[in-house]
Amino acid sequence: MIYVASVHYGRMNHSENFFCREGGIKMDDSVVIRTNRGIELGLITSPVQEQDREDVKGLGEILRKATDEDIKISEQILTVKEPEEKQYCNEQIKLNSLPMKLADVEHLFGGDKIIFYFLADGRVDFRELVKDLAKNYRTRIEMKQIGVRDEARLLADYEHCGRELCCRTFMTSLEPVMMRMAKLQKTTLDPSKISGHCGRLMCCLRFEDSTYAELKKQLPPKGTIVVTNDTMGEILDYNILNQTCYMETIKGDRITIHNDDIVERKGKSKVNRSHNKFNKKKTENPETGKQNKGQKKDSKKA
């Protein structure tokens, strides 16, 4: 019999399933865990499940519930050791004239390893730096190169919405976010409004992308000829969330209908609407095909 729960740990907000052979732990408990990096402090973020099995392959281990002394040691690491290690590493980077920027330092709870997160444009030969750090702290040293999204994940706090960054709270991996997602959701395309602290497109654009894509499939594409109980016409535009369509009827009227009002779809219109009389300015005389004089003067004034 084992107990399994999801545990949140590490500076990069890892979240994995861990097992414990003894009960007495519950959600929101701080626990001491063994990961592939070493001994760390984590937080249980899911209900503890009792499972009747012995196979623990692929699971980390919860060693025990964290004590008050463990919490004090963790606070000392955060407030004393890591700032000192960051300062020393920055001094060595400057001394060795290395083209890199130190973003943060993570000193594991058990002291098994110190991880230095840095940014650089390309590969950096930091062998001498690692030797200096290992000699000074006498533990395993890991230099981890990160990107701007990871830097925001480590250092930033709150986003435009007023909530703490998603990548700091619940996201376990940073998936790519594309401009087509913003276009599909018809958000503003102003980079300053849809970019996060990292300067990249905000991750929340990805959260609703699948919903928007599924709702869009239910709507007729632009240019489709549709029939309702009252009229027939061509779809000009649509609102994905409201499931409404803006259409031009055969009489030339433009109306808004709900997707449920459509009783038949007759396929795409053969009219090239980009050159349609409804979309271009009427600057020609329909009889002669020549530009009207009055309109020509107005265009000169403009």
Image: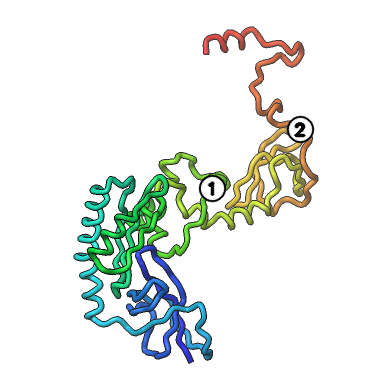
65 lies left or right of 78:
right
Q: What residue is shown at x 63% (from left), y 56% (from top)? A: 214
226 lies left or right of 109:
right
Q: What residue is shown at x 47% (from left), y 54% (from top)? A: 203
Residue 11 in the image, given as x and y percentages of width and height: 35, 64
Q: Is residue 30 or residue 119 the one in the foreground?
A: 119
Q: What residue is shown at x 36% (from left), y 59% (from top)? A: 143
Tag 1: Cα neighbours inside 10 Å, few (<14), some, or many (≥20)? some
Is residue 197 visible to us here?
no
Q: Quadrant of residue 280?
A: top right
The coloring applied to the image is: rainbow
Q: As displayed, is residue 252 above or below residue 214?
A: above
Residue 81 in the image, given as x and y percentages of width and height: 21, 65
Q: Where residue 178 is drawn, which disc sits there?
A: 1
Q: Nearer the viewer, mark 1 or mark 2?
A: 1
> Identity of the amino acid at label 1?
Met
